[in-house]
Image: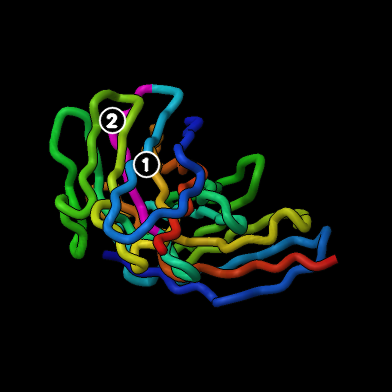
Amino acid sequence: SAVISQKPSRDICQRGTSLTIQCQVDSQVTMMFWYRQQPGQSLTLIATANQGSEATYESGFVIDKFPISRPNLTFSTLTVSNMSPEDSSIYLCSVQGSHYEQYFGPGTRLTVT
Amino acid sequence: DAKTTQPPSMDCAEGRAANLPCNHSTISGNEYVYWYRQIHSQGPQYIIHGLKNNETNEMASLIITEDRKSSTLILPHATLRDTAVYYCIVRVEGNKLVFGAGTILRVKS
């Protein structure tokens, strides 16, 4: 299994600002994923990020709002842009293992005021 | 996409086996069943997966019916630390995970 870290672990931000979340993996992986978990809800996939290609976004999520970078096989960032209180959520990254299972980071808890 | 149905919540006594059911009646022949859990305020944790044979690892056992329309995750000796939301997921094309509401398992002393 992979060990995944995320920074920051939590943040409180003002509306209209942007926050970049970092995801670091201890091994090289091809597929990385970004999820959102709104308060009291289950996880929703935001996008799939493969190194060397543009991220693929799910319905309801757009690149202007959630730009993603994937500069190498161990790192990715997700930016939450022009934040509003509705963006208050836990944001999680995950990586795919050898049997298509996914390993998740600890999450970034974002509160927008 | 194959959908899954799980009971919203279950209780289990500490030290007893926890048996968590999942229905996936529309599963295709080559789709795997995956189980994850999420302990409060943590990222989801992969538990186990299977195709049609029963599987066991250090965390749990997975029993899949012969027609593959349902499965059961078994935690053989539940502890208080097993209290979590358990998700049964059928992997869809593109390797995406579609999370449902899951089952809240409460282990009680």
Callout 1 secondary element = strand
| Label 1 packing within 10 angstroms: few (<14), some (14-19), many (20+) | many
Q: What secondary structure characterizes most of the magenta part?
A: strand
To which residue does mark 2 refer? A30
Pointer 1 or 2: first along the chain: 1
Q: Is residue A32 magenta?
A: yes
Rendered-image quadrant of the N terminus of chain B: bottom left
Rendered residue at 50%/54% (across/down) = B35
Residue B57 percent location from the top left of the image: 61, 41
Marks 1/2: CA–CA distance: 19 Å
Q: Which residues are magenta?
A: A28-36
Rendered-image quadrant of the C terminus of chain B: bottom right
Residue A14 percent location from the top left of the image: 37, 57
Point out which mark residue B80 bears: none
Rendered residue at 31%/64% (across/down) = A84
Q: In this rendering, does residue A45 appear at all?
A: yes
